[in-house]
Image: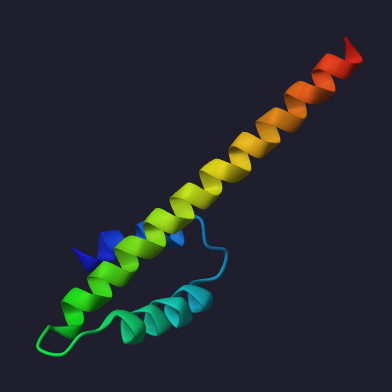
Amino acid sequence: MRTELTFKALASMPNRYQLVQLAAKATRALHRPNTRVQDTMNDALERLSAANHVQSEMVMEASLESVSAEQLQAA
């Protein structure tokens, strides 16, 4: 359902208005003739949630690496 897609995309986005703007831009960019706008919007929200998930994983990995480097220096 779109609600679940919205909450997944919103999980790592700090501002819901920013999410709406990005979803609208992505929907306009991804939309093809003879397809439903609803399906295009669902695809855009899936892509945004996947991108946010990957980005948040990269941030977590970078922070873990910096913490482990600090611990090595302290030892």
What's the residue at 53%, 51% (across, down)?
55
What's the residue at 67%, 30% (across, down)?
64
The N terminus is located in which quarter? bottom left
Give the color scheme: rainbow, by chain, secondary structure or one colour: rainbow
Place of residue 48 in the rendered image (x, y in percent of width and height, measured from the top left): 40, 64
Q: Is residue 67 left or right of residue 60?
A: right
Place of residue 20 in the rendered image (x, y in percent of width and height, measured from the top left): 43, 79
The C terminus is located in which quarter? top right
Taking the view exactly as shown, the residue that stands out farthest to the top is 75
Q: Is residue 11 left or right of residue 6?
A: right
The answer to whether residue 50 is above or below residue 72 is below
Taking the view exactly as shown, the residue that stands out farthest to the bottom is 33
Place of residue 66 in the rendered image (x, y in percent of width and height, measured from the top left): 76, 32
What's the residue at 47%, 56% (across, down)?
52
Q: Is residue 47 left or right of residue 51?
A: left
What's the residue at 26%, 76% (across, down)?
41
Quadrant in the rendering for residue 36: bottom left
Taking the view exactly as shown, the residue that stands out farthest to the right is 74
Q: Is residue 74 left or right of residue 5?
A: right
